[in-house]
């Protein structure tokens, strides 16, 4: 019999043999899933070793496939420590052979067959070859491994949608070229194929142009940056940066080597304070203007009545278009306020010139916007490119062959597709990755609000229900967007992007098949190890079980909250945006989050009172009642004016037992407040009614006097 100590040693040695990675056998499971995998277990697989070479052959663009082959050699180097030699020519044994020439209608399709002597990758185009190489990269082992066995297999893989994108907003925060490349590289890893570069906004112009040097001299720098939402606090340091043309070319080339198209966005006519600060004569009022230091939507926009604006845009496009070989220029078009135009004599002269009149479908302002976009579209066409715009460009009548990015839901996309326009879906509720990704928002980095969990992103269906079958072809795909108001660092961008972008990548690649969230999560765990190894932040919390959060103790019932079997009834409906789970949110035992009232832990009333009636299901002693409210006057969120508590035995006749007048906090307050009402004497009742009277509108004297305010409420505790 083996001595235990020796047995242990032997075990240790075998364990060591497994971890020093002489040999690893790959599995073909990854994210996104591969479409068709025919394993051939009866056949011997391919052994990648020090003698393996990478060989390429192509009837066209030999240098393109050579670049792809070299990328593969780099990836093998990362996984093995040795870099295979890259050669051209016809197949030799022990090579990974890359070819472009596979016959398939989808240019990104590829076949990958693994035999004892070769791995043969054949792409329907150079794009297909590049996707296959990224697939291999995702499959390679995590730890340096001497010999890698690829089991014998025939794989056929191709994406469902031709536009699989992710954007990066480099205007709200600037990110250096190195990071932009790192971002593009992780898109490539998941076989995404479009990088949308949001290069200009109110808070900064980021692309250097020869004809307009002030755009970067002045427009790329802001004096300071607001901290948090609705605060009056600012950083003490200026923020800025821009890319030289050489850097833009370098990034575009880097993307092209990975078969990724770069779509630059020059956002006009709104979101242009950085332009106006540089060239004030392009605005309606003439300024002076400043590069924005806060977020949101600004009134000052490019003047639509001034011909200089169109000369400017033509010159900008003249310099921008040649830098980007792709077919599209994104011209923004979002969130353009029209009040300056309506008050500007030049813009009004334009209205007369065009004979614009308000019609039921479109205001004059909307028609001006559509005139503006049309003129810019002509300039883009002249340069043999097409425009993409946010769904606002539908307002006022849409430009001729514009492609629409539908962000305010999918409705804009449906309208556009029905009119025969191409559409890229990017509805904020599913695909804005600057939103929170776990409900544990107080332990997440601060965001602008809202909650888009991984599973929600995964559940996104790019083809809206109800779209006619013959219009489906207009849905080119979808895109994840990262706005960076609250995301100042590259690491933070990665954390917001991953793993949610992987969920989108899976949908866009495999649609409509194989939608299995738990299987996705299982594969994602392995993929996230790879992301760790590659030095990317990714939010593992997004798919791991969270420990149960502590609940508010409900003393009256002697058990943790959920006050009644049935949630209480609300007398007034919460506002649609802030309704979430309705009344049950108020009695679910969980206190509303401190960092956001937009993620489902609070419910909000717009210009209305909150009144809830709770059935305790049996006569219960009651000595106090508390209610939480979120105070944020600068954000339009006011506390209750007065809180009233009444009790009832039958649910019909109520007796008021306590009331409290609440103080208006300072304008700067941003916090949840607990209001507790102690009953003057303990009472018993089955029904409790709590009414929080709203201020309803901003008080007299306030800049926004008369406009409605919100009342945000959470947990009602009866004790
Ligand atoms: C809306 S999306 C915007 C951006 C903001 C974003 C914040 C779009 C076309 N406009 O300017 O950064 O919301 O999530």
Image: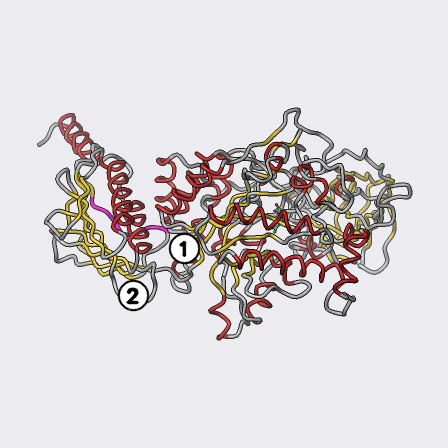
380 or 33: nearer the eye?
380
Q: Which label sits in the foreground, 2 or 1?
A: 2
Q: Nearer the viewer, residue 673 or 538?
A: 538
CB atoms of marks 2 and 1 within 8 Å:
no
What residue is drawn where x is 58% and y is 54%?
A: 429
Residue 164 point in image, percent of width and height:
44, 55
Which residue is denoted by mark 1 in the rendering?
Answer: 506
> Whole-percent x and y of residue 325?
43, 51
Q: Is 386 situated above or below 452?
A: below
Mark 1 Cα shell of 10 Å, populated few (<14), some (14-19), many (≥20): many
Q: Residue at x 26, y 44 (%)?
A: 72
Q: Which residues are magenta?
A: 25-31
> Mark 1 falls on what kind of element?
helix
The quadrant holding residue 566 is bottom right
Which residue is tagged 2?
Answer: 104
Q: Is mark 1 within 8 Å of ligand 1?
A: no
């Amino acid at each position: 019999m083996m001595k235990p100590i020796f047995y242990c040693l032997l075990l240790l040695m075998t364990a060591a043999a497994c971890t020093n990675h002489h040999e690893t056998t790959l599995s073909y499971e990854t994210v996104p899933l591969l479409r068709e995998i025919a394993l051939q277990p009866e056949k011997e697989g391919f052994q990648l070793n020090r003698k393996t070479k990478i060989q390429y052959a192509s009837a066209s663009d030999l240098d393109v496939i050579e670049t792809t082959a070299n990328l593969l050699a780099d990836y093998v180097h990362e996984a093995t420590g040795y870099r295979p030699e890259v050669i051209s020519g016809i197949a030799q044994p022990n090579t990974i052979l890359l070819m472009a020439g596979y016959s398939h209608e989808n240019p990104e399709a590829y076949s990958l067959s693994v035999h004892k002597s070769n791995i043969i990758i054949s792409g329907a185009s150079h794009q297909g070859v590049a996707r296959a190489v990224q697939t291999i990269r995702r499959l390679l082992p995590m730890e340096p491994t001497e010999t890698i066995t690829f089991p014998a297999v025939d794989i056929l893989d191709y994406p469902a949608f031709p536009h699989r994108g992710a954007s990066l907003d480099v205007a709200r925060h600037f990110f250096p070229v190195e990071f932009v490349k790192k971002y593009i590289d992780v898109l490539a890893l998941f076989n995404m194929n479009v990088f949308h570069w949001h290069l200009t906004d109110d808070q900064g112009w980021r692309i250097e142009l020869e004809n307009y040097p002030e755009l970067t001299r002045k427009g790329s720098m802001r004096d300071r940056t607001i901290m948090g939402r609705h605060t009056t606090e600012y950083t003490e340091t200026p923020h800025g940066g821009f890319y030289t043309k050489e850097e833009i070319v370098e990034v575009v080339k880097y993307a092209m080597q990975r078969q990724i198209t770069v779509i630059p966005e020059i956002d006009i006519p709104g979101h242009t304070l950085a332009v106006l600060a540089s060239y004030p004569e392009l605005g309606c009022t003439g300024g002076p203007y400043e590069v924005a230091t806060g977020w949101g939507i600004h009134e000052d926009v490019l003047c639509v009545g001034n011909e200089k604006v169109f000369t400017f845009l033509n010159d900008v496009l003249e310099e921008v278009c040649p830098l980007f070989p792709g077919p599209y220029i994104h011209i923004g078009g979002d969130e353009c306020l029209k009040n300056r135009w309506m008050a500007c004599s030049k813009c009004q002269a334009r209205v007369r010139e065009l004979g614009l009149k308000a019609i039921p479908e479109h205001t004059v302002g909307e028609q001006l916007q559509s005139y503006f976009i049309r003129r810019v579209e002509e300039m883009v066409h002249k340069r043999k490119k097409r425009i993409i715009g946010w769904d606002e460009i539908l307002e006022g009548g849409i430009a001729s062959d514009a492609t629409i990015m539908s962000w305010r839901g999918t409705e804009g996309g449906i309208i556009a597709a029905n009119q025969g326009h191409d559409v890229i879906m990017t509805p904020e509720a599913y695909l804005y990755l600057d939103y929170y990704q776990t409900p544990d928002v107080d332990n997440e980095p601060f965001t602008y609000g809202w909650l888009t969990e991984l599973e929600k992103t995964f559940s996104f269906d790019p083809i809206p229900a109800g779209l006619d079958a013959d219009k489906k072809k207009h849905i080119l795909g979808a895109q994840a967007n990262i706005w960076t108001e609250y995301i100042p660092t590259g690491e933070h961008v990665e954390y917001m992007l991953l793993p949610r972008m992987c969920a989108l990548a899976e949908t866009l690649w495999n649609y409509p098949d194989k939608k299995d969230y738990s299987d996705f999560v299982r594969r994602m765990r392995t993929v996230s190890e790879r992301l760790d190894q590659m030095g990317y932040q990714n939010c593992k919390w997004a798919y791991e079980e969270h420990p149960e959060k502590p609940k508010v103790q409900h003393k009256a019932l002697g058990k943790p909250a959920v006050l009644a079997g049935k949630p209480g009834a609300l007398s007034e409906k919460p506002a649609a945006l802030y309704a979430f789970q309705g009344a049950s949110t108020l009695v679910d035992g969980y206190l509303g989050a401190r960092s956001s009232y937009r993620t489902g832990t609070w419910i909000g009333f717009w210009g209305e009172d909150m009144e809830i009636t709770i059935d305790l299901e049996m006569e219960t002693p009651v000595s106090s009642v508390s209610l939480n409210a979120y105070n944020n006057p600068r954000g339009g969120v006011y506390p209750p004016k007065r809180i009233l508590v009444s009790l009832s035995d039958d649910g019909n006749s109520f007796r008021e037992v306590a009331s409290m007048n609440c103080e208006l906090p300072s304008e700067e307050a941003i916090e949840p407040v607990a209001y507790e009402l102690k009953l003057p004497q303990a009472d018993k009742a089955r029904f409790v009614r709590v009414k929080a009277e709203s201020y309803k509108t901003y008080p007299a004297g306030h800049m926004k006097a008369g406009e409605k305010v919100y009342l945000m409420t959470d947990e009602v505790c009866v004790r």
